[in-house]
Amino acid sequence: MTSSHRKLDNVCAIVDNNGLQIDGPISEIKSSLEPIAAKWKAFGWNVIEADGHNQEQLLQAFEEAKNKKGMPTVILARTIKGKGVSFMEGKVEYHGVAPTEDEKARALKELGCGE
Amino acid sequence: MDDIKTLKERTLKMRRNIISMLCCSKSGHTGGSLSAIDIVAVLFLKVMKINPKNPKMETRDRFVLSKGHGAPALYAALAEAGFFPEEDLMELRKVDGKLSGHPDMRKTPGVDMSTGSLGQGLSVANGMALAARLKGLDYRVYALLGDGEMQE
């Protein structure tokens, strides 16, 4: 609310909206965050929704944010926890756990490393 | 288009670095670092006005990683942007290393705010943004929040 009250158009918040927290899906642990866009709007923010793994979309969103005057912008970025490594994607188990040597080797292979 | 291709390749490399540094440290937050890295990469490699040779440049854009446990994503980006050598990433979570488990502005070049206590990043960003106005500077402040922390 401070951001919009003070008309801080030099503030840009980004929400890494991966839907999971340490103990499981956010929607099961507390109430759902939805409707998340409406909530930010109600607090006086310019809201942009984007795919948080589509960098073209993100670049465009940041450009839009920069050009929006008189109010702060939030980019609601839909993301997938563990994105890029198939056996980690959407798995809450990897919230606060580092990969083992074996998992590292499998992950690096998926990420284009030949070892 | 080449530009985007290079950005994607560099982001892929940052993903590999996240996995490697976390495996090396044997602890840390993998999932949320991988979900945030595309965003952080766009900011540090394309959007933000920063100077790795002068990390404290007064007119730089600021970045607050409110979800501080995603530090590996921030460190991978700082190394890729040239704030410190890539090899240093393996210092993650090592005693006396400059890369703490959560970002520490006193230890790591390029880190604008120490974070990790969730729910506070946006307030800090507001303060930085107000400071820009008072000083007549035109920098922008970016704050990356986790969805989980929004209802902590």
Image (spheres, rainbow, N blue to C red):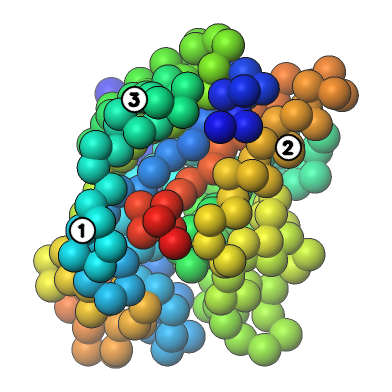
Q: Amino acid at mark 1?
A: Ser
Q: Looking at the image, is B146 positioned above or below residue B129?
A: below
Q: Which residue in the rendered view is the most extreme toward the left?
A: A86
Q: Give the quarter of the image for residue A40.
A: top left
Chain letter of the residue beneath label 1 in the structure image: A
Q: Amino acid at mark 3?
A: Ile
Mark 2 neighbour density, 10 Å: few (under 14) some (14–19) many (20 or more): many
- SS label for mark 1: helix
Residue at the spot x=69%, y=73% of the render? B98
Q: Give the quarter of the image for residue B58.
A: top right
Q: Quadrant of the N terminus of chain B?
A: top left
- SS label for mark 3: strand
Q: Which residue in the rendered view is the most extreme toward the right?
A: B135
Numbered mark located on residue A48 in the image = 3
| Residues tagged 1 and 3 counted as in contact (Cβ below 8 A) | no
Specify whether A107 is left or right of B98. left
Q: Nearer the viewer, residue B27 or B17?
A: B27
Q: Residue A16: x percent and y percent?
A: 35, 48
Residue at the spot x=72%, y=85% of the render? B96
Q: Amino acid at mark 2?
A: Met
Q: Looking at the image, is B67 positioned above or below residue A51?
A: below
Q: Which residue is mark 1?
A: A27
Q: Quadrant of the C terminus of chain B?
A: bottom left
Chain letter of the residue beneath label 3 in the structure image: A
Q: Nearer the viewer, residue B126 or A1?
A: A1
Numbered mark located on residue B128 in the image = 2
Mark 1 or mark 3, earlier in chain:
1
Q: CA distance from mark 1 to mark 2?
A: 32 Å
Residue at the spot x=57%, y=24% of the render? A4
User: Of circles 1 and 3, which is in front?
Assistant: 1
User: Of circles 1 and 2, which is in front?
Assistant: 1
Q: CA distance from mark 2 to mark 3?
A: 22 Å
